[in-house]
Amino acid sequence: MSSIVPESPFKTKLLIPHSSHLSIHSIDSHTGLIKVQSRENSDDLPNFYASPMKLFRPNAWKEVSLSNSRQMSETSKIKQPESLKDQIKRQEISVLEELENGNLEDAKKIMESCMKNIKKVYGTYDLENIYSMYLYADVLARAGDIDLAIHYSEKALHTIEELPPHIIKEPQVIQYQAMILYMAGVLYINSAQPCKGIHALQTLSSILENYQIESISMVTVKLTLGNAYIQKQKYVEAQRVFDICRQAYTSDDPMYHQILIKMLQCAMSLNQFNTVEGYLSEAKEYLELYDDTDKYTILSSAAWFHTHREEYPQAIEYLIKCMEHLKNTDQEFSNEMGWVLTELGNCYIFINQLDDAFEITCYAKNVLEKSVGPHSKEVANAVQQLGNIKFKQHELQESIQLYKLSKSLFINALGPVHDSTIQVCLCILHAYLQIGNSSAAWEVLRELNAQEYSYPPETAGLVYNEMGNVMRECGYFTQALQYYESALRGYSMLEENNPDLGKVHFNIGSLNLQIGRMSEATLHLSKAKTIKEACFGKDSIEIVSVLEKFAEVYKAQGRTKDAYEILKKALKICVGCKSNKEKEIRKQISNLRNHRNK
């Protein structure tokens, strides 16, 4: 079986920086938010999440400006009776000052007291009450209480929605609604609720299209929306949003290049190799503009690009550059170094330097044990890769032991029905079948089948598809077909054009071709082609493998001309995508031409 590629380093993490003395700098490539830095002698109050907004003074939206409020707080030092309203103003000012100074716990305590006072003085629909919920949500978010922060931001939004229509349209209310929507969007994304985050940010985008709100720019919202799309794995939508954002900047602006990295990651997720190549070429020209984290992202992206193009020497070259970069930035025992080493070992597997692959993967395992812990999924990945190497070296008993160790680590880290756990179980099954231990193989199958009702639909589809692959490779064609059909049922609850569903149709079509059932082969290959075109585009390299199978069907049916034409179409795609498969397709065309001339 093919080796399991280690988890990609290009995951989007949206974090709320717990810093209160902030200034805008540029987008953080990992959070998607604006990088912030300490700024001395700043009169600006902190904004709510180190978000890409202009810094603002929240109390400036009230009847009394912050500067006047501070003057009032000074005069309040004169001994005279203090009303609850004055006390609330003083408490809000104190909260903002504590946030400026980074005293989160003090700010939280003051805000809790302030909320109690507000309930005594103001009604539910008073703007002061809405503002207090907004400010309290900010304090909670900074203090790390995301769930409660979401609760108060939602409560504030619901309160605004219940206001009379003529009040909702007041500029001050629209300002509040916009700021709270942005807050809620970021909080949802932070708490892994991208759908809610997307809805909040789309609503905010509509508001910004109709109203002028100085404290938030449309680009800010689009950037955060793009990150939400990435979290939801909606890469096409994220691409579109980031492309709009990039047009707001010139190539000499650091923001332009931060957005470029996001677009690069989207293109990689969509396997758009031509686009990836263009972005990488542009990014490399400005490599010195990037910080250490972004340089690593570019180098590792280049390694990914060449690996997926099956250009392993070039991939190895960039992985070695990644290693050198990480060593030079004191990250020799980081998770990133573990990923680089694991991927380097994987590349050596592909060029059949198995001893080197084993040595490097052992090194990766040691690094990962130190960086993320000995029982992590990353270590499980490395152990599975060691099993893959032993499998290729025909040391099957050793490979089984390594696979079993990997399985126990995956179960501990991810659970028994996670995709990674299932994959390594299938590796064990494959190894048992290879050595002829049918009783052990059927025991693995029994275990997998026993968990059938625990699998979510996509996992059930994956399990049965991989079982079909194993059975087919070992010559059990009838069982393979049964498992593939079970995979179709597993995926039936997913969207019609799911790429995994396309893989199953491709496998069924290929198996029917192998056993001479041409009409069934044509039916399923046609479905695979339709799905792949919908997911990746008609000129994607993903289509080539289907076209090759169609050519085999046509050759088997004696339709040499049709086979020739479809291979020419495959060649055109390969040339356009600069794929290494070009040579292979040219060879097939040459062989077909020679066959026709006989």
Image: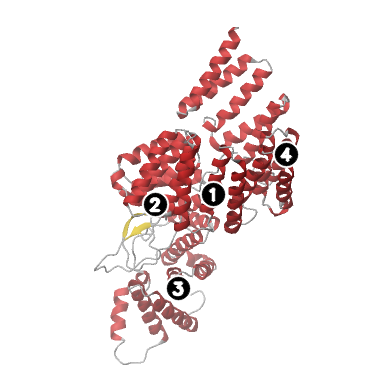
Residue at 47% across, 58% down: 372
Distance in Å between CA atoms under marks 3 and 2: 28 Å
Q: Secondary structure at mark 3?
A: helix
Task: Single out the mark in the foreground, 4 or 2.
Answer: 4
Q: Earlier in the sequence, mark 3 or mark 2?
A: 2
Q: Residue beneath label 3, please?
A: 136
Q: Residue beneath label 4, please?
A: 485
Distance in Å between CA atoms under marks 3 and 1: 47 Å
Distance in Å between CA atoms under marks 4 and 1: 31 Å
Other-residue count near label 1 (Cα within 10 Å), few / some / many at <14 / 14–19 / ≥20: many
Number of marks in picture: 4
The type of residue carrying mark 3 is Tyr
Task: Single out the mark in the foreground, 2 or 1.
Answer: 1
Q: Earlier in the sequence, mark 2 or mark 1?
A: 2
Relative image position of residue 165 (x, y in whole percent): 52, 65
The type of residue carrying mark 1 is Val
User: 283 above or below 593?
Assistant: below
